[in-house]
Amino acid sequence: MPTGLTKDAGWQIGVSRTLPHPAPIVWDFISSSEGLALWLGPGAVLTPERGAPYRTAAGVTGEVRGYRPADRIRVTHGTTTVQVALAPTADGARTMLRFHQEHLASAEEREQQRAHWQRILDQAAAVLDRQ
């Protein structure tokens, strides 16, 4: 089976980076309106309960599949599922921020989304570094 292709979730991609910020600071940003606009799309407002719908300004719709404060958010995004998760380092000074997307259509979409999530991580890191 090719890299990134799974039996259950189709094509998927995961991208992560450890940021030099404690988890509460990363969570506050990633779950804020500015953070949601960055990774989910402008206009996205999430209600932190399973099944709650959302819509971005670009017209992408989805619903909340999981929302664990200070840990992870999982949503459908069009025909895919996106999860953002945090993992603090043992000393609590740094946090791994991870984006995972599954049910992608093809190997080509997987590569496009890898580049997309790497750009999102770059932008999130830049915003957090300025705070």
Image (cartoon, rainbow, N blue to C red):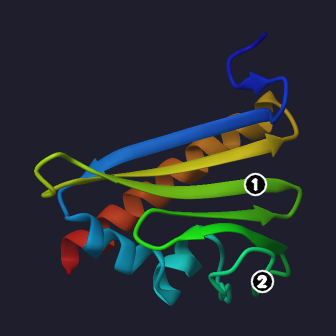
Percent x, y for residue 13? 64, 37
Quadrant of the rendered image containing residue 107: top right
Percent x, y for residue 40? 64, 71
**Residue 54 got which mark?**
2
Quadrant of the rendered image containing residue 45: bottom right
Q: Viewer-proximal residue, 37 or 81?
A: 81
The residue that appears at 61% across and 56% down in the rendered structure is 83
Q: Viewer-proximal residue, 55 or 66?
A: 66
The residue that appears at 57% across and 80% down in the rendered structure is 37
Instruction: Identify the amino acid type marked 2.
Output: Tyr
Instruction: Identify the amino acid type marked 1.
Output: Thr
Badge 1 density bin: few <14, some 14–19, many ≥20, Cα 10 Å: many
The residue that appears at 62% across and 82% down in the rendered structure is 48
Q: CA distance from mark 1 to mark 2?
A: 13 Å
Question: Is the residue 123 above or below the residue 109 in the image?
Answer: below
Please give left or right for residue 27 compared with residue 94 in the image. Answer: right
Please give left or right for residue 52 compared with residue 39 in the image. Answer: right
Work out which residue is located at the far top of the displayed protein and give it.
1
Instruction: Look at the image and tell me in which quarter the N terminus lies.
Output: top right
Quadrant of the rendered image containing residue 129: bottom left
Q: Earlier in the sequence, mark 1 or mark 2?
A: 2
Question: Is the residue 47 above or below the residue 41 in the image?
Answer: below
The residue that appears at 68% across and 17% down in the rendered structure is 3
Q: Viewer-proximal residue, 74 or 10?
A: 74
Residue under circle 1? 81
Please give left or right for residue 35 compared with residue 27 in the image. Answer: right
Q: Does the residue at mark 1 contact the one at mark 2 (Cβ under 8 Å)? A: no
Badge 2 density bin: few <14, some 14–19, many ≥20, Cα 10 Å: some
Helix, strand or loop at label 1? It is strand
**Residue 31 got which mark?**
none
Helix, strand or loop at label 2? It is strand
